[in-house]
Amino acid sequence: MFRDLFSADAWREAWRIIQAEFAGAIWETVYVTVLATLFSILIGLPLGVLLVAGEKNGVLPLPAWLLRCLNVIINLLRSIPFLILMILVFPLTRLIVGTVVGTTASIVPLVIAAFPFVARLAESSLREVSPNVIEMAKSMGASPFQIIVKVMIPECVPSLISNATIALTTILGYSAMSGIIGGGGLGKIAINYGYYRYKYLIMLAAVVLLILFVQLCQSAGTRLSHKLDKRIRNKK
């Protein structure tokens, strides 16, 4: 079995498939991951802000029932396994995209799965802001919106970037799983060739590329976070 797996014919066939299909699959993976991350941040960051600012002693208190509802919705969505969630949101995906199969269609379940995760990450980052800084802004007459936009978010930018990197790498992993329902990208190639056709060299190549993507994104996010961290800059 292993001799057939690493035979000269297997290598030649793997190289032919890599040349023919991997460029498009890489583009599809980047396209889906970037868009899903962007939409997840656009939805999740405001929710994270509301979870912190909307508390009883926050800068923008919300009704207790509304805050509980937000927490319940976020917790429910986070607790559903991604493969099951993809199937559950088929009607919504069809309503938005017009189909439940394909690269673009996979963005909808990715966003629904990721934005609660992003909201919790944003909440965690915002809770790191010193209460003294917020109290100082209040004493200077800043409005709740000004405190959120000009104090809370800027103060935790390094942490937000670090957590956004975590979210991006998580979405990248989810995008690979979306190949099971016809989503494009490297995940689809790994499943179609590695699982259905037993061409493990193709699957191995797809997995290696996904690992490289994760490492690249993580390294870039960590470097940017450190560059913007005032504490590290002050030490220098």
Image: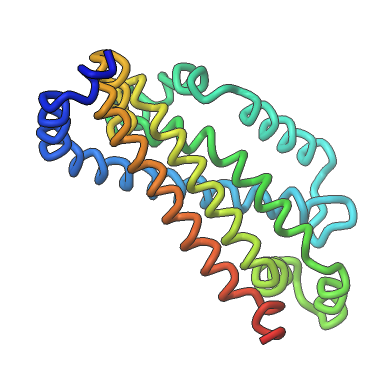
Q: Quadrant of the N terminus?
A: top left
Q: Is residue 69 left or right of residue 206?
A: right
Image coordinates of residue 204 in percent, x first then y, are 32, 31
Q: Colour scheme of this structure image? A: rainbow
Question: Can you see residue 104?
Answer: no
- Asked whether 194 or 39 is in front, the reply is 194
Q: Quadrant of residue 203?
A: top left
Q: Is residue 76 above or below residue 39?
A: above
Q: Quadrant of residue 176?
A: top left
> Which residue lies at the image location 53% right of the left edge and 54% below the top edge?
165
- Asked whether 199 or 36 is in front, the reply is 199
> Which residue lies at the image location 83% right of the left edge and 69% below the top edge?
130
Q: Is residue 55 above or below residue 32?
A: below
Q: Is residue 77 left or right of residue 180?
A: right
Q: Residue furthest front?
A: 3
- Asked whether 96 or 84 is in front, the reply is 84
Q: Quadrant of the C terminus?
A: bottom right
Q: Is residue 106 left or right of residue 62?
A: left
Image coordinates of residue 94 in percent, x first then y, are 35, 23
Image coordinates of residue 175 in percent, x first then y, are 40, 34
> Which residue lies at the image location 70% right of the left edge and 85% below the top edge?
234
Q: How many marks?
A: 0
Question: Can you see residue 171?
Answer: yes
> Which residue lies at the image location 71% right of the left edge and 37% below the top edge?
70
Image coordinates of residue 171 in percent, x first then y, are 47, 40
- Asked whether 29 or 51 is in front, the reply is 29
Q: Is residue 62 above or below residue 200?
A: below
